[in-house]
């Protein structure tokens, strides 16, 4: 499967390649209805049951405090370790953390979405890209942190090449683009490259 690359504008669903990212995005759109983002009580995770193993849920408490509340089994299997309860800062290189923190905080607080890809190396075979979509979910209770739901899936089958190498840290990734979910987007200057945003 090839990675479809756009340099400006466009709609998110037109850019996605993997079943998990497409299925999650379609479900998220249904859950939110006319709102900017869905609330937790509106989620119907059974609609994406076949993709849950690629889902992670991060609670964004502040620009410095972001913790993974749920990490799917396929992600843990790929990484060779359990990531639930880990903070994003712990999974980031020191040089990457300021930018990653700013991007993630912008997604949760603006709110907006984010898509990117990461090239991972595996025990066997060549490196393979994983496709990512990150979208916010609001709390039912005012003042409770926003959660960022992230779905990822390799663009090729890596089941026979696991585990992933270099599992200590998450990479910033390539082709980072904000997604306008109806509230506009943060400044593209936050991104590694100022690539134009997508619409949802």
Image (cartoon, rainbow, N blue to C red):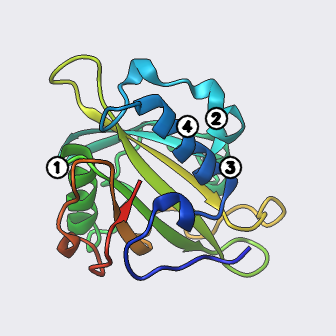
Label 1 – label 3 distance at C-alpha = 29 Å
Q: Do the residues labelled 4 and 2 touch (CB within 8 Å)?
A: yes
Residue 82 visible here? no
Label 2 – label 1 distance at C-alpha = 29 Å
Task: Name the spot of residue 161 as percent of width and height, x first.
Answer: 79, 67
Q: Are marks 1 and 4 in contact (CB under 8 Å)?
A: no
Q: Which of marks 4 and 2 is nearer the N terminus?
A: 4
Between marks 1 and 3 in the image, the one whose residue lies nearer the viewer: 1
Question: Eyeballing the image, is 98 above or below 8?
Answer: above
The residue at which mark 2 appears reads as 48
Q: Are marks 4 and 3 in contact (CB under 8 Å)?
A: no
The residue at which mark 1 appears reads as 63
Label 1 – label 4 distance at C-alpha = 28 Å
Q: Earlier in the sequence, mark 1 or mark 4?
A: 4
Residue 27 tag number: 4
Q: Nearer the viewer, residue 31 or 66?
A: 31
Task: Name the spot of residue 42 as percent of width and height, x first.
Answer: 44, 21
Q: Which residue is drawn at 60% across and 66% down?
A: 130
The residue at which mark 3 appears reads as 77
Q: Residue at x 59, y 48 (%)?
A: 81
């Amino acid at each position: 499967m090839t990675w479809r690359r756009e340099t400006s504008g466009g709609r998110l669903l037109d850019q996605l390649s993997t079943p998990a990212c497409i299925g999650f995005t379609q479900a998220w759109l249904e859950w939110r209805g006319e709102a900017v983002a869905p609330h937790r009580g509106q989620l119907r995770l059974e609609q994406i049951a076949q993709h849950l193993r690629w889902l992670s849920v991060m609670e964004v408490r502040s620009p410095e405090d972001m913790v993974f509340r749920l990490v799917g089994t396929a992600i843990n299997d790929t990484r060779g370790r359990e990531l639930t309860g880990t903070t994003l800062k712990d999974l980031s290189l020191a040089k990457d953390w300021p930018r990653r923190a700013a991007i993630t905080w912008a997604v949760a607080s603006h709110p907006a979405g984010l898509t990117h890809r990461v090239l991972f190396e595996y025990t066997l075979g060549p490196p393979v890209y994983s496709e990512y979509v990150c979208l916010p979910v609001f709390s039912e209770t005012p003042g409770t942190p926003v959660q960022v739901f992230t779905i990822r899936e390799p663009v090729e089958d890596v089941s026979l090449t696991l585990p992933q190498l270099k599992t200590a840290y998450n990479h910033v990734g390539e082709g980072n683009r904000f997604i306008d979910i109806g509230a506009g987007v943060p400044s593209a200057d936050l991104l590694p490259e100022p690539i134009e945003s997508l619409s949802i």
